[in-house]
Amino acid sequence: MAHWLFKTEPDDISLDDIQRAGTMRWDGIRNYQARNFLRDQCAEGDGVLIYHSSCKNVGIVGTAHIATAAYPDPAQFDAKSPYFDPKASVDAPRWFCVDIRYHAHFAELLPLADIKADPKLQEMVLVKQGRLSVQPVAPAEWRHITARAYR
DNA sequence: GCCAACGTTGGC
DNA sequence: GCCAACGTTGGC
């Protein structure tokens, strides 16, 4: 089983929103590297760290699971959607999405600053690359982070 | 709001 | 295919 980190802006969708929804579509990914991870590697049952970005307290807030393999993101075909892509077609979809299922909140946010300061997490894509909204998490990183207390 | 990093677009 | 211009991400 693989593990992932998904970024979200909590002003848009927070882990609380995911919890309320139970299962929700993770759509609107419009970056090829992120798309390729979703389309080619994300599998049902994989674990997902949920990361809040572009907000007051940035960091990892909890966990979810991937609930479906990737499928074409319907928003790319919807001319009224901000995620509409005129170059995509049903026969040749360009963008993909998955559904995720809420799992748990950590008792406390794991701040980005703590991640950057943790010797065990120096190799995280989050630390080394930044700008990537779907990224793989190594098994040891997953174990280390999910050993935290839950709410 | 600033700005660094980096991805994408498009002219040539 | 190069690369400048431009747009977006995202921390601070």
Image (tube, coloured by chain):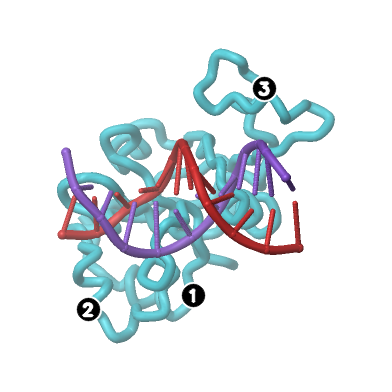
Chain colours: A cyan, B purple, C red
Closer to us: A65 or A52 = A52
Mark nearer the N terminus (1 vs 3): 3
Is there CB contact under 8 Å for labels 1 and 3? Answer: no
Residue A38 location (% of width, % of height)? 61, 51
Task: Determine the image quadrant of residue C11.
Answer: bottom left
Residue marked by disc 3 = A77
Amino acid type indicated by mark 1: Ala
Question: Is residue A151 or residue A37 the one in the foreground?
Answer: A37
Say which of marks 1 and 3 sits in front: 3
Circles 2 and 1 on the same chain: yes
Closest to the camera, between mark 2 and mark 1, is 2
Three-letter amino acid code at the position of disc 3 = Phe
The answer, for residue A69, to whether it is visible in the render is: yes
- Answer whether residue A42 is visible to the viewer in this image: no
A144 shown above or below A97: below
Please report the residue visible at 34 percent of the width from the left and 77 percent of the height from the top: A144
Position of A39 with respect to A109 (left or right) is right
Say which mark, if any, is on residue A117: 2
Q: Residue at x 44, y 52 (%)?
A: A6
- The residue at 71%/38% (across/down) is A94
Q: Which residue is mark 1?
A: A138
Distance from the alpha carbon under mark 2 to that under mark 1? 17 Å
Name the element at disc 2: helix
* Chain on which label 1 sits: A
Which residue, as the protein is rendered here, is positioned at the far bottom?
A119
Identify which amino acid the numbered label 2 is placed on.
Ala
Q: Is residue A71 left or right of residue A64?
A: right
Q: Position of residue A33 (x, y in %)?
A: 60, 56
